[in-house]
Structure formats: C-alpha cells, structure tokens
Amino acid sequence: MSIAMISLIAVIVLIVLDQIIKYWAVGALATGSITLIDKVLSFTYYENRGAAFGLMQNMQTFLIIASVIILIGIMVLVCLGRIKGNLLISSISLIVAGGIGNLIDRVTNGYVIDFIYFELIDFPIFNFADCCIVVGCGLMILYVMMDDLKPKKEKEQKS
C-alpha cells in the first residue's frame, strides 16, 4: 500500500475520531467540567467562534473560506506529487485531518467545539483536531530542519 493511500486512510480515521470525541464532549460536558488532574488538566466545554487563541472572533465566513482554500491547495500539491517524503506527507496528513475536523464544526455549528483545558498555565481550551494540527506542524518543522541539514552534510563529505 502506498504512503498516499495510508495517509488518506489516516486522515479519514482522524477526522472520524475527532468528530466522535467532540460528540462525546457535547454530551458529557453539558453539566460541567470533568477534572482529570486537579488544577492542572480538565475537560471543559467551550464554543470557539474564532481561530487559535480566540483570534478572529465571529469571523466564521472568513475562517471557512480560508480553510477551504488552504485545504484544497494542500490536496492539489499532494495529488500532483509535489509533496514527497514520508515525514512531510505524514505531517501534511495530520494538518489536513485537523483542519477538516475543525472545518466540519464551523460549517455545521458555526463554532468549533473545544474541551481540553490545561489549567496549570491557563492555556486556551483546545481539541483533538488542534492537537493533530500542532503535531503536524511540529513534524513539518522537523522535516524542514532535517532537509536543511542534508546539503551541509553533503558539502562536508565532499571536503
């Protein structure tokens, strides 16, 4: 099975998992938060009507259009074979899955369902799709750093 097919399956699984978790959060957190680690981590229901860190509040139309354009652009690059390397494809897959998971919320609800609250540092409430995006971006940074080191190694070997 090709990496592209594996990535497509992973994207679908992650989107479904994200939506199942959010469905659970809506029902389970309707009556209040669930403390996982006292004063550190809890599940707290929150309707995010903006982007990351509460930016662009109530700009759903813009966020939907921007998300669709970015996701289409990424998918075109993948289909054209412009994105190569297992690590880069994996990172893109995580970003796409998270983006689509949050896009589904924006289109169906008018907001994104967030529920993971890291109380210890009063971090903004986030969700599984956000985790996918952050991990995907981290892997992409790792890919770029590793790719940046390749020419240096080749130059050192030639000297």
Image (cartoon, rainbow, N blue to C red):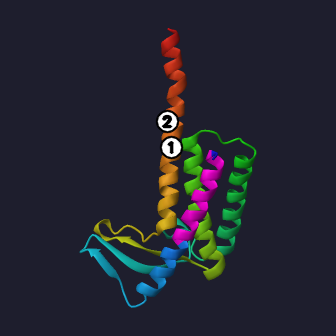
Residue in the picture at 72% in, 57% down: 72
**Magenta stretch, residue numbers:** 3-18
Residue in the picture at 29% in, 74% down: 36
**Local crowd size for mark 2, using a 10 Å CA cut-off: few (<14), some (14–19), many (≥20):** few
For residue 141, which numbered disc appears in the image?
A: 1
For residue 68, which numbered disc appears in the image?
A: none
Does residue 43 appear left or right of residue 4 in this picture?
left
For residue 145, which numbered disc appears in the image?
A: 2
Regarding mark 2 in the picture, which secondary structure is present there? helix
Vertical position of residue 11 compared to residue 38: above or below: above
Marks 1 and 2 sit apart, C-alpha to C-alpha, by 6 Å
Q: Is residue 14 magenta?
A: yes
| x and y, in percent, of residue 147 in the image | 54, 32
Amino acid type shown at disc 1: Ile
Is label 1 in contact with label 2 (beta carbons under 8 Å)? yes
Vertical position of residue 116 compared to residue 150: above or below: below
- Quick one: 26 or 40, which is closer to the camera? 26
**Of helix, strand and loop, which mostly describes the magenta segment?**
helix
Q: Is residue 73 magenta?
A: no
Amino acid type shown at disc 2: Met
Residue 117 appears in the figure: yes
- Quick one: 123 or 75, which is closer to the camera? 75
Regarding mark 1 in the picture, which secondary structure is present there? helix
- Quick one: 4 or 77, which is closer to the camera? 4
